Amino acid sequence: MSLTMRDVWARAETGPICPTQKFELKVLFPEVKKLVGKYDIKYNPESPVPLDDKLIDRVFQAGLELLTGAGVLCTDTERIIQFEEQEVRDTIRFVSGEVTLGEGKDAVVMAHRGIEDRRLPVIWGGPVAVPVSENIMIKAYESYAREPSLDAFWTGTLSHIGSMPVKSGSPLEMHAEKINVGWSREAFRRAGRPGLHLSGSSAVTPRAPIGACNPEYGYRKSDSIHCYMVVNMKTDYDTMSRAEHYHAYGCLVWGGGTTFIGGLAGGPEGAAITAVAELLATYMIYRADILLLWTPTANYAPGMASRRAIWATSLASSSVARNTNFAWLNASPYQAYAGPCTDMYLYEIAAPTIAFVTCGGHPIQGGGRQGGELDYFGGPLDTRFLRDVAYATTRLNRSQANTIVKAILARYEDRIKAKDPPVGKRFQECNDLDTLRPTQEYLDLYHRVKEELSGLGLEFK
Amino acid sequence: MSEEVFDKLRQGILNFDPEAIEKAAKEVIARGLNALEAIDVLTGALREVGSKYEDGDAFLPEMMMAAEALKAGTAILAPAVPADEKMPAVGTFVIGTVKGDIHTIGKMIVGAMLATAGFNVVDIGIDQSPSAFAEAAEKNKANIVGASALMSTTRPGWKDIVEYFEALGIRDKYKIMVGGGGEHTRKYAEEAGVDGFGRDAVEAVRVALKLGERNDKRPEVGK
């Protein structure tokens, strides 16, 4: 029997009571450890792109069993929302495998992709939650919208309005959300792409994006707004309420897991199966139309482009590709460790993109410096590079992709371990603010790194 | 004889087994062994778990469980330590995520690492107001207050805490540390006027230990 969102809300009120810390330490983590052992999942640094289909299928089954074995804790009621395996299978069976992003002539279809799929992925770009200065925001957004390789745009975060910092939960946050969305629309209009898909609310409180759902000045029904899991395998009434509103309004729901390697799910093996379980959960609980699969490293090496992170995300992605009809995004990365306009920044885009696109994902890429520093995103050349690498990847098989990814990792992972990434440059230093085109310095670097990647076996056309 | 019991304590931490530790701790008391030495064994084993975590051989839940197991042991052993041998604790650290921010993993990792370093860690959770930090600091006689904020829109919460503590006239009683988001947020910490910043859990522990050294209000285990 397939479940509705209302069925899930009822279970949040009637499921077994479990205090949060007990759920984390006595329910979730032991279940993860048990499943990692039962399904013989072992981290293999030599295979950041998984080659073993039996392992890939075991990871999916382990993820499904984690969802049905541990369930999802609702932190407001401290009750576990439980699922039966057949309910999950019956519910995900009806996933169409396609979602239309944007509208009119700017609409694109994001479809389920399989492993080694020759179809081109949809290219998502933008500052992706990186703080953006008020005085460059529209120009920066327009520069992305002008870039033909961009299919869907993810906004940055307006950090100040005038001299006032935008603070979570304040009226200014609500105001900033409307400004951010409105200026995105204006930027799209200036670029001649008024129907471009918009996503990326950076507000923490639900009322800000909910208040910005408005076809005239805010989120349109062809846009998407996110609903994340609460770390790990948890949800809350705020997020479930977001999902209720977005579906009632008619926009797309963008569902993301929150699996960090070294966090509550344990090591990369546990993170891989928890990422699968959380992806299934975001559909079961929020009916997410667009899903995110990622496993950034919480310790060991910061960021989303470490070897462990690529291994776990690739494995989880492959398992979803082979066992479901979902279309999902992989962070390629959201927030690089290095700053823009450096070779490491481009390597951090290339390695995960090659791995994830091979495993069936659609890539989304944002800024650098771990996403926290003002204006540290590279602009449209980032997206062009992402597109070039992603499209070239569709001509690779898994074995070729694995070899190239390892060669690229060798060029930057020591710099992650040393915690000394290059600082790079801000958007204003990577682009000419009058022409909104990349600087010659950044263009030269873009061509040089592409030549390096060609030398490693990536064929650009 | 003591080695055998002490090994049970150590294994109890490494296996995250509070029941085994309680049993071994009671054995320490029953046999009249040195309770302070036994506590040393427990904290040493907890440091081992912390090192394993840094090497990627142990995970956050295991650090949390090991810290809980240590509490179970010290609750039994501490009263048996003679008054003139009380071991100075590193201190009490109140930790939480600032108002409006619901990110928890970084805070949990730092909290668990602080516990392995010997701090009595009081975690007040996510989305906490400055008053909640102040109340927890006063109630638990904290030495250090630590505030996590991951997002640019929640970092102003650091300054809010500093100003709130100043307004209450309790700023000088506590060292205030912040973190979240990595190295590039250091300058925001400086602007907020805090005493310490950790770009990651390892640096947070190092800075906290240093701040603890300068603080003359360190409590003692068992008091």
Image (cartoon, coloured by chain):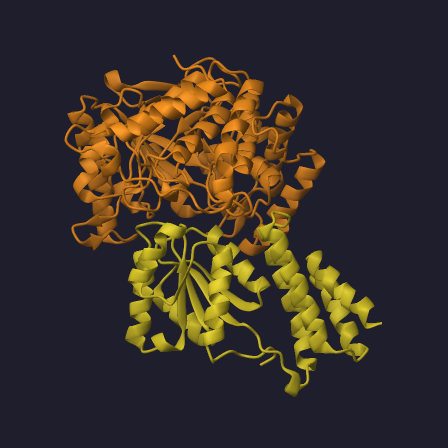
Q: Quadrant of the C terminus of chain A?
A: top left
Residue A287 visible here: no
Residue farthest toward the bottom in the current orientation of the protein: B84
Chain letter, colour orange: A
User: Can residue B85 be seen by looking at this rendering?
Assistant: yes
Relative image position of residue A191 (x, y in whole percent): 18, 24
The residue lying toward the viewer, choosing from B20 and A282, is B20
- State which chain is coloured yellow: B
Please name the residue shown 61% across and 49% down the image.
B55
Name the residue nearer the viewer: A183 or A378. A378
- Compared to residue A57, the image places residue A412 above or below, namely below
Q: Residue at the location (35% across, 49% down)?
A: B151
Up/down of A88 relative to A115, above or below: below
Residue nearest the viewer, comparing A406 with A104: A406
Residue placed furthest toward the right: B1
Q: x%, y% of residue B1?
A: 85, 72
Coordinates of residue A448 in the picture (x, y in percent): 37, 24
Residue under the point 65% across and 47% down:
A30
| Image coordinates for residue A87, horizontal then vertical, percent | 57, 30
